[in-house]
Amino acid sequence: MEVSNQHLPFELTKEYIEKIQSAILEENHDLIKAEMEELYSADITSILYELSGEEAHYVVSLLDTKVTAEILSDLDSDERKKLLKNFSSAEIAEYINILDSDDAVDIINEQPVKIREEVIALLKDREQARFIIDLMHYDEDCAGGLMQKELVKINVKQTVTECVEEIRRQAEDVEKVYSVYVVDDDGILLGTVSLKKIILAKRGSKISDVYEPDIVSVQTYMKGEEVADIMQKYDLEAIPVVNIQGRLLGRITIDDVVDFIKEQAIVDVQAMTGISEDVEEDDSVWKLVRSRLPWLLIGMGGSLLGAEFIQFFDKDIALYPILAAFIPIVGSTGGNAGIQSSSLMVQSLADKSGLSISFSERLVKTFKVALMNGILSSGLVFLINLLVGNELKICTIVSLSLVSVILLASFMGTVTPIFLSKTKINPAVASGPFITTANDLVGYGVYFYIAHILKNMF
Amino acid sequence: MEVSNQHLPFELTKEYIEKIQSAILEENHDLIKAEMEELYSADITSILYELSGEEAHYVVSLLDTKVTAEILSDLDSDERKKLLKNFSSAEIAEYINILDSDDAVDIINEQPVKIREEVIALLKDREQARFIIDLMHYDEDCAGGLMQKELVKINVKQTVTECVEEIRRQAEDVEKVYSVYVVDDDGILLGTVSLKKIILAKRGSKISDVYEPDIVSVQTYMKGEEVADIMQKYDLEAIPVVNIQGRLLGRITIDDVVDFIKEQAIVDVQAMTGISEDVEEDDSVWKLVRSRLPWLLIGMGGSLLGAEFIQFFDKDIALYPILAAFIPIVGSTGGNAGIQSSSLMVQSLADKSGLSISFSERLVKTFKVALMNGILSSGLVFLINLLVGNELKICTIVSLSLVSVILLASFMGTVTPIFLSKTKINPAVASGPFITTANDLVGYGVYFYIAHILKNMF
């Protein structure tokens, strides 16, 4: 039997990009059109990322309005802003007209105020304009900012036959229908009917007899992370959004939440590793420099303070140069123990599914784990140092410092994210160079203080 | 108007847990049953996490088989294994019987071989047994391991009316139906029909007239990450899985992929921050100690090597104790620059949507960014050191070392993840304590080497 690959995902190759680029150079409309017709909009999007601004504009100008609209909702914010600079407000309005309201709002909010106003005024679909104005005032990271207004709803007093008619009427506007939302006369959400149930129900049945009243909804102010957790917990492909009275306002579909989860993961990792802007490898050299420099400088500033501090002890060092040799172990152990604690705490703070334990329980547990780790590891270091032939005094100073540093760094790694989570700062930052540098400094302080005291004791 | 919260997600409180625990103590069946009937299975799952093993078993023994089965698929692997130790193979078989095949296989694969064989032999639903045996040999991280066999399929020669009958026939087995898969006589996947289309189509229409042939599928061997990327790219709530001939074998639903994405993100962050087992804050003290100790020891081992190395220069240090003061800045800058590069590279390697740039292009870009960062930051440090009143010689040694260290650490941070991605090791490990320690050591080497050479030069 022949190997079929007709349904396998499109794979972008360098050769393909070169083919498209030379077709653009030759202004070969027909070839480009023919090629793009073979592809899904998401594939065209990935091609656009590889083209220059003018090339991308040329390709997009050859596409259907509908395909372009889909591409616009796929593109990331930077690329989209660049691309849309080539279009008039009237053209943008045409795309906005056919997009889902959540994507439409994201795009409009990126535009300068003047264009924003023009586009909304130029929208032919006045319902869409109303949707957008409704959604514009929500913060983009909360349920209100993630929801779309497009959904199929039906009054609980109606019948399955009327419901099918409603689906038919809205089929154009609502691309993905998973279930129909059931509301009362005041628009209060009562439940849902799945499409499966509608297919299997007798046409004349009353909605009130077939709908599922046990459903989960979220309110507009809920954070994106909470929405993601809830949808994941209950395995939902869409969740209705209601206001405080329980009125149905919109729905959030799983595809937007998946994007959100992925973005959050990237932001967290970047925060932890000291990258201060949302960058990608293919950003400009200057943007990459700019995103890294702040943390490098903060780290250096901290270490320069440390250098001033260590100089207080230069007489001790001149006397015992071997003290210098153990500066790194103290610094890096503090850094490592701190980052381990803070990353676990960040994860724990993000995971709301369990019951949160109390602050004091946390501290006690942190203390136990740190003490065990400290004793085990510094004990080993003590033995190794003795075996290598270092003075007992030095071995004692180093291992005592290590235990203290692990205790202190674990404490700071646990407390800092809790503190940050109560502010507007992403707690993941606490696992970054900032806390690592702070822990390094604490380490040096403890080490030289212990050394200074113990050096004359035996 | 009254504030409605009937559809808001259940919130677990300490008081609630205490109420359930005292009901268990009093063996108050009725109260527990009544409380649990009010809740979704996912909520009961979150309660079980807060109970002891015996308490959890007691609660579960009061529940419906169907609810228990759902809870089993929700629980994480550790808790599930603990809970299932209390059940006989016959009881486990009853739950497995009604679970989706993907969840059933996950649970069976966790059991000891003997129980595994018994459970499969005891399954009443022989189709389910066949499904499970089919799925058991796939790796759990590939498409075959993520898919479930439950789906509704229809021959392309049939009609919409027959399709509705098929949905009715399978309604029990297939919980979530998004669309019906269309196959030919050989079972080769041809396309899909969405439920919306089935509702809107005339009942007598031929499937061949209404189905959508442009669909994306994946093959069994594809990695979970790739499946997640594809589903996200094309905004799919389910994706069909085919074999190399294009035969329809199963489907993967978005809820399983969302779990997968989240788990991956946690594994990556833990790898980056030096936690070697998948732990959570509420794990035992000993497990937490064990998960952290390896990286702490590796870091210490590296630093002890560094200590030996720095001792080569103890004469230089005794002469210029101020050299010791700048050990931290060199070490931490190397660590920070390295972790920035590697985390960006890990992100870039994970993001397959763009065309990957060549190895040499990457290195050139890394070099440019590192050189700019190095010159800017070490220039600033040079000025500060001069202003603070340090000797010109020391200022020069420190800043020259910083530039070199940033270049070297960026290079290692870029190359290590690329190298690891070609092995079986998670490239995120490259952003962890291992590479940080390695970069620290490189830093000290460069620093003392430069100091040793320059100390007599001016």
Image: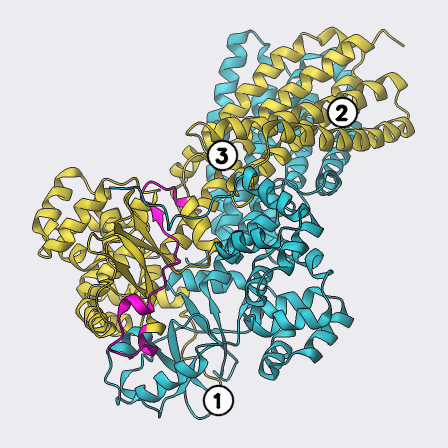
Chain colours: A yellow, B cyan
Q: Secondary structure at mark 2?
A: helix
At x 52%, y 55%, the residue is B42
Q: Are the numbered discs 2 and 1 placed on the same chain, yes or no?
A: yes
Q: Which residue is mark 3?
A: B371
Q: Type of residue at label 1?
A: Glu
Chain under disc 1: A
Crowd class of label 3 (few under 14; some 14 to 19; many from 20; radius 10 Å): some
Locate residue A63 relative to residue A433 in the image: left or right: left
Q: Residue at x 61, y 48 (%)?
A: B49
User: Percent position (x, y) of residue A117?
Assistant: 12, 42
In the picture of the structure, the residue carrying the numbered disc 2 is: A403
Chain under callout 2: A
Q: Neighbour class for label 2 at 10 Å: few (<14), some, many (≥20)?
A: many
Q: Amino acid at mark 2?
A: Val
User: Looking at this view, is B342 or A167 the one in front?
Assistant: A167
Judging by the rendered image, the residue that carries numbered circle 1 is A2
Overall secondary structure of the magenta stretch? loop
Q: Is residue A411 left or right of residue A165?
A: right
What range of the chain is rendered magenta? A198-224
Q: Nearer the viewer, residue B310 or B232?
A: B232
